[in-house]
Image (cartoon, grey):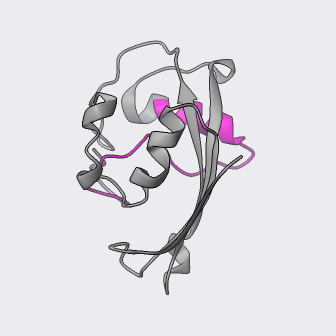
């Protein structure tokens, strides 16, 4: 559960912005440590989706997100100021409390597909204006 900032109040994955001279995988390792106190090895996770998000009349919200899947890590997820982690079974994912786009790509990723997608939201993110989802 995202507790502050962009996406507050939604169930979402760990993530954040790149630091200067940091690779996307290095950022994923750092953000996972900072947000849920779990240590990842960059060789133990893979990029399973690249998703471009656009918001009408809010270009400052536009972003490209790289989604990674990890099956090995050190430590147990713990709550931080940023988020409160919680495990869900595949059958009980709380899509009604997640970003609207998640239902269109997350089940496919969890079944093993690698996805490239583009979602355009209205200005406040309450509706998807257009979407494209394809296999990478």
Q: Residue at x 58, y 35 (%)?
A: 68
- 86 left or right, relative to 104: left
**Does residue 118 sit above or below 51 in this rendering?**
below
Residue 84: give x, y in percent of width and height: 26, 37
Q: Residue at 36%, 61% (x, y): give it.
A: 100
Q: Quadrant of residue 131?
A: bottom right
- Of the pair 105 and 72, the residue shown nearer to us: 105
Q: Which one is in front, 48 or 15?
A: 48
Counting from the top left corner in percent of width and height, residue 41 is at: 62, 18
Which of the two residues, 135 or 99, is positioned nearer the viewer here? 135
Q: In the image, residue 71 lies at what x, y percent?
A: 52, 18
Assess whether residue 25 is covered by the magenta stretch. yes
Question: For the point 63% across and 18% down, which residue is it?
Answer: 44
Q: Is residue 85 visible?
A: no
Does the magenta-highlighted stretch encompass residue 20? yes
Q: Do we see residue 16 in this rendering?
A: yes
Instruction: Say if 73 sits above or below 24 in the image.
Output: above
Question: For the N terminus, which image quadrant?
Answer: top left
Instruction: Name the residue at 31% across, 41% down.
Output: 83
Residue 127 versus residue 70 in the image, above or below: below
Span highlighted in magenta in the image: 7-32
Q: Residue furthest bottom?
A: 57
Residue 78 position, x and y percent, is: 30, 25
Horizontal side of 22 relative to 84 (left or right) equals right
Q: Main secondary structure of the magenta part?
A: loop
Tally of numbered tags: 0
């Amino acid at each position: 559960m995202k507790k502050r900032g962009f996406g507050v109040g939604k169930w979402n994955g760990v993530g954040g912005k790149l630091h200067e001279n940091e690779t996307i995988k290095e950022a994923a390792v750092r953000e996972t440590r900072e947000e849920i106190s779990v240590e990842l090895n960059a060789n133990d996770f893979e990029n399973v989706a690249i998703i471009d998000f656009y918001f009408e009349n809010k270009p400052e919200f536009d972003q490209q997100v790289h989604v990674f899947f990890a099956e090995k890590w050190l430590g147990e997820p713990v709550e931080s100021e940023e988020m409160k982690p919680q495990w869900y079974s595949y059958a009980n994912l709380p899509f009604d409390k997640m970003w609207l786009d998640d239902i269109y790509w997350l089940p496919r990723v969890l079944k093993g597909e690698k996805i490239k997608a583009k979602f355009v939201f209205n200005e406040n993110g309450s509706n998807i204006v257009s979407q494209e989802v394809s296999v990478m």
